[in-house]
Image (tube, grey):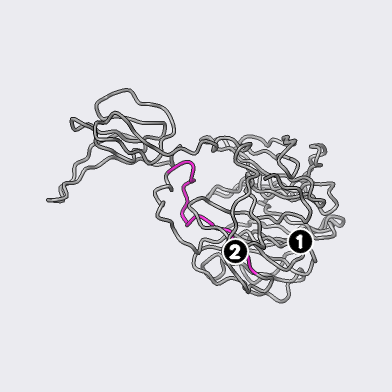
Amino acid sequence: MFGRGPSQIVSIDWRTGRRELLTQGPGLKVFGNWLPDNHFAYITRTGLAFSDQRAEIAGDFGWPNWNRTGSMMVFHREVDRASDQNRAFKVWHSPDARFELLRLSGQASFSPGGDRLVYAVNNYAGDVRNGRLVVANTDGSNRRTIYEGPVTDDLAGPAWSPRGDMILFGLGGFFQRAPIRTARLMTIHPDGNELMALTNELGNAGMPSWSPDGKQVVYRAVEGRARGLRILDLAAKTTRVLETGSSYDTFPTWSPRGDWIAFTSKRDGDYEVYRIKPDGAYLQRLTRLPGPDAHPSFSPDSEWIAFATGSRGFKDEALGLVIGALPPQFQPYGEIAVMRLDGSDLHVLTDDSIEQGTPVWIPPGAAISR
């Protein structure tokens, strides 16, 4: 329910500034509220606790507030958080009529015909990290898991092939800070058959994107502290470095026309979106915003790029950073933005306290459930 790390409940005398430690011991303790007779209640990682030794009430309680007699409490709870069946496939309001928004569960990719999609779901419980791939109809029906990875491995960046016969994804260690674990590029058929590794077990490869002809894959490779871009020729089984002039690039995506690769770079100390030709020519920085900008995605006509931006900063709901419904982060929660291919006409489409990220474009003619 809550983020990690110990904390205590403290009272302060507003007249003198004197502080008093009211709790002790390990574990997270937040949202203290006074009750009658100088008792108080607070939230722990597992539920609602009391200072008068009453039994803890297990459950998910956010932002609690008690009435004066201590007989009743109001609180916040996201009722559909535990189920990707409920969270996914919701149409959201867009401030720009040109761009409709659809909320999906996890990182997603649509089939070329737009009739199906694949998305990754990662489950975290302590040291257990388990991911799975789910294929569904675009309207959200007929969902089924086609692959479930081993414990301790994440799934990242599923990408449906241009011919519709393969799904490409990363499998391994992606979201741990240090030390960097191994990860490989994998392919699997949409029916869940013929799982195959494209890269070896020695490095950390992930965040793949197909070339429009399906003959090449651009991906992010980690070597030591450096993150760079690589292009894999599937027929020749050879890999070349995409020279960008930086040692920290990630999240590459190939344009549907095949003439550009967009990616995220931290070369200037901040995550920004760039584009480059597949041969390494014509590098161009596209964003110059405060906060991180990442996860670029080309529109089907290659005229627009959607991406996640932290430029809106922290919200007044920043306390939500310790709530499981809003996972702990070291950066502002992302919003979805769009811009022209050259970086012009940039505007943000979302503005709320929920993390938005990994945007993907819906193919024309796809049937979306409303």
Q: Residue at x 85, y 52 (%)?
A: 163
Q: Is residue 142 shown above or below 311?
A: above
Q: Nearer the viewer, residue 258 or 150?
A: 258
| Residue identified by numbered label 1 | 300
- Label 1 SS: loop
Q: Residue at x 16, y 50 (%)?
A: 14
Q: Residue at x 34, y 40 (%)?
A: 30
- Label 2 SS: loop
Q: Residue at x 18, y 30 (%)?
A: 37
Q: Quadrant of residue 94?
A: bottom right
Badge 1: how crowded within 10 Å, few (<14), some, or many (20+)? some
How many discs appear? Answer: 2
Q: Quadrant of residue 192?
A: top right
| Residue identified by numbered label 2 | 248
Q: Quadrant of the C terminus?
A: top right
313 on left or right of 356: left
248 on left or right of 320: right
Give whichever of discs 2 and 1 has the lower sequence position: 2
Amino acid identity at mark 1: Pro
> What secondary structure do most residues of the magenta stretch adopt?
loop
Amino acid identity at mark 2: Tyr
Magenta residues (range): 323-339
Badge 2: how crowded within 10 Å, few (<14), some, or many (20+)? many
94 on left or right of 69: right
Residue 47 appears at what percent x and percent y?
A: 39, 31
Q: Is residue 335 shown above or below 38?
A: below
Contact flag, marks 2 and 1 (Cβ < 8 Å): no
| Residue found at the far bottom of this picture | 282
Alpha carbon distance from label 2 to label 1: 27 Å
